[in-house]
Image: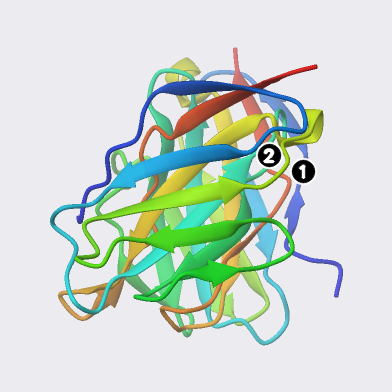
């Protein structure tokens, strides 16, 4: 499975921007970069995904490096509700099959 | 759509009993995933189906675990016999069969085996 590397934890203050990094040096040309987050006591929820270009949606922005070996999830103004574990996942076709495999993720703490 | 629906939400059973977890995916989705989450091992992919066919079950821990998808609107994960180490939260997720689409997760079933 294509691997991603994320910091175990990060801390931010409320209403400040947060940049969550992810390294994926073994990414293949057809892998999409997906981000999910898991709030306490809930199932994971989709945040954003991209292939090559930077992406924006109502929740966050995704900045993808030119060589695609790393990406950054950007929360423009963190709120207390953004405290969660954030997972960076490569979704691609391996051996003719798809997989959505979660790593350990980054636990984001937001301070009031 | 009500989203991915899992039942039961909580299950407490005695060691050695059979446990069946159920999942109803979002209508129209053709990929379905079963995950298990524990503090020690995180979120593990157990098995996934495309168009009701099991594609990869390499994450299923052992023969005590089995999963079926008899039709596009229903899947089960069965543990027989159950053991205390099976205690975990089990999530079901569904998506369209495309790389550039999101998966939707259910609320999970918290299983406790005593």
Q: In which quarter of the image is the C terminus of chain A?
A: top right
Residue B43 lies in quadrant:
top left
Q: Evaluate whether residue B51 shows in this view.
A: yes
Q: Which colour scheme is used?
A: rainbow
* Circles 2 and 1: CB atoms closer than 8 Å: yes
Q: Percent from the top left, x then y, of residue A32?
A: 36, 71
Q: Nearer the viewer, residue A78 or B108?
A: A78
Number of numbered labels in the structure image: 2
Provide the chain ID for the residue under circle 2.
Answer: B
What residue is drawn where x is 36% and y is 54%?
A71
Query: Where does residue A18 sit, x and y in percent of width and height?
Result: 58, 37
Relative to B70, is B45 on the left or the right? left
Q: Which residue is found at the position 49% from the left and 16% from the top?
A: B84
Q: In the figure, residue A89 lies in which quadrant?
A: bottom left
Q: Which residue is at the far right?
A: B2
Distance from label 2 to label 1 (Cα)?
6 Å
Question: Does residue B11 sit above or below B33 in this rendering?
Answer: above
Q: In this view, does B61 lie to the left or right of A85?
A: left
Q: Mark 1 points at which residue?
A: B8
Determine if marks 2 and 1 fall on one subunit. Answer: yes
Host chain of mark 1:
B
Q: In which quarter of the image is the N terminus of chain A?
A: bottom left
Judge left or right: residue A72 versus residue B76. left
Task: Of the two numbered discs 2 and 1 on the same chain, state the one appearing first in sequence.
Answer: 1
Front residue (pair B111, A6): A6
**Which class describes the residues within 10 Å of circle 1: few (<14), some (14-19), or many (20+)?**
some
A13 shown above or below A64? above
Mark linked to residue A47: none
Position of residue A64 measured from the top left corner of the image (x, y, whole percent): 36, 62
Residue at the spot of label 2: B109
Q: Is residue B26 left or right of residue B64?
A: right
The residue sitting at 57% across, 66% down in the picture is: B103
């Amino acid at each position: 499975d294509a691997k991603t590397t994320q910091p175990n934890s990060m801390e931010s203050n409320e209403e400040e921007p947060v940049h969550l990094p992810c390294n994926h040096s073994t990414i293949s040309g057809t892998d999409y970069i997906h981000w999910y987050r898991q709030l306490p006591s809930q199932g994971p929820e989709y945040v954003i995904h991209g292939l090559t270009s930077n992406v924006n949606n109502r929740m966050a922005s995704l900045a993808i490096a030119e060589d695609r070996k790393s990406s950054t999830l950007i929360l423009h103004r963190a709120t207390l509700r953004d405290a969660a574990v954030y997972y960076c996942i490569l979704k691609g076709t391996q051996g003719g099959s798809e997989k959505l495999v979660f790593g350990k993720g980054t636990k984001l703490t937001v301070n009031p | 759509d009500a989203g991915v629906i899992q039942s039961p939400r909580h299950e407490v059973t005695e060691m050695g009993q059979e446990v069946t977890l159920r999942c109803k995916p979002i209508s129209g989705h053709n990929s379905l995933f079963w995950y298990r989450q524990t503090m020690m091992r995180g979120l593990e992919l157990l098995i996934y189906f495309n168009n009701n066919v099991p594609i990869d079950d390499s994450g299923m821990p052992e023969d005590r675990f089995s999963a079926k998808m008899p039709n596009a609107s229903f899947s089960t994960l069965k543990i027989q016999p159950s053991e205390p180490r099976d205690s975990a939260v089990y999530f079901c997720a569904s998506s369209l069969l495309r790389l550039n689409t999101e998966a939707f997760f259910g609320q999970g079933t918290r299983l406790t085996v005593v």
